[in-house]
Image (cartoon, helix red, strand yellow):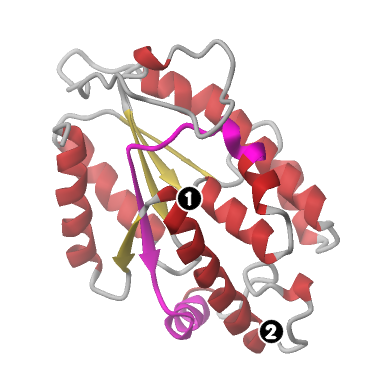
């Protein structure tokens, strides 16, 4: 994490922060002066592109930024990656692996960055983790309690892209489909393409269900990247202005 140079802008103080549940002990929410912005969406929805464009815009206008995402914890990310390569993890083990990855980044990156006045851009957050687990049959109330440590973001944008377009983008980028993003562990279909379509449709349905609880903004991710980014910049500008 970089120090904030003297000529950079520190975002305004926010006094009404809260955790979704029990939170992390001894965290003074009043001192978290930065902003937490989350971009959600499936692989191929354009999250990474949008975050890169937002970083360029924010830093170009004098804001210090930090980026976080799934499997980026120094504590367990390498172990999680290795375990997934074997495609043998149980649903509970996979869930707790990701929860540990998130908790470590929250405590050691997100909260310190917010305390220092940074804008934290999260390439997915607890919503993807919860949706994945719910699709795999895990109890929603248990998951909400598990992720009660999570800080409520200042803004959450879900890039909505139909599975038909996601599969085309995945093939164009990787020439293959990912085992986990295709939900092959669920036994929906022996055919990976068919499983991908069924899994992504179920994930989108689950995200719409979570949206009712967490009130994140659904963004049409099928448009040109520049048009989407202009919409995100407009909404984030309002957040930074305290509106």
Within 10 Å of disc 2 (Cα), the crowding (few <14, some 14-19, many 20+) is some
Q: Quadrant of residue 56?
A: top left
Tell which circle, 2 or 1, labels the residue nearer the N-terminal end.
1
Q: Residue at x 61, y 82 (%)?
A: 198
Residue occupied by mark 2: 192
Residue occupied by mark 1: 124
Q: Residue at x 69, y 84 (%)?
A: 192
Left or right: residue 63 compared with residue 101? left
**Number of numbered discs:** 2
107 drawn magenta: no
Q: Which residues are magenta?
A: 145-172
Please provide percent x and percent y for residue 231. Answer: 18, 58
| Image height of 102 relative to 205, above or below | above
Please provide percent x and percent y for residue 6. Answer: 19, 12
Left or right: residue 198 compared with residue 232? right
| Image height of 95 relative to 194, above or below | above
Mark 2 and mark 1: Cα distance apart in space: 24 Å
């Amino acid at each position: 994490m970089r120090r904030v140079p003297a000529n950079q802008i520190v975002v305004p103080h926010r006094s009404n922060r809260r955790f979704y549940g029990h939170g992390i002990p001894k965290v003074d929410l009043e001192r978290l002066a930065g902003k937490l912005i989350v971009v959600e969406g499936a692989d191929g929805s354009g999250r990474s592109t949008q975050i890169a464009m937002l970083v360029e815009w924010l830093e170009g206008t004098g804001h210090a930024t930090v980026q976080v995402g799934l499997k980026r914890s120094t504590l367990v990310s390498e172990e999680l990656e290795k375990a997934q390569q074997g495609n043998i993890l149980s649903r509970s083990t996979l869930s707790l692996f990701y929860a540990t990855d998130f908790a470590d980044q929250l405590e050691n990156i997100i909260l310190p960055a917010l305390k220092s006045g940074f804008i934290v851009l999260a390439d997915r957050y607890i919503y993807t983790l919860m949706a994945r687990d719910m699709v795999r049959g895990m109890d929603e109330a248990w998951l909400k309690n598990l992720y009660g440590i999570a800080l409520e973001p200042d803004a959450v944008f879900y890039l909505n892209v139909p599975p038909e377009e996601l599969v085309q983008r995945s093939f164009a980028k990787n020439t293959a489909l990912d085992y986990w993003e295709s939900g092959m562990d669920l036994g929906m279909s022996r055919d990976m393409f068919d499983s991908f379509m069924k899994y992504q449709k179920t994930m989108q349905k689950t995200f719409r269900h979570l949206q009712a609880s967490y009130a994140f903004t659904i963004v049409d991710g099928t448009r040109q990247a520049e048009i989407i980014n202009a919409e995100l910049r407009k909404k984030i500008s309002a957040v930074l202005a305290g509106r």
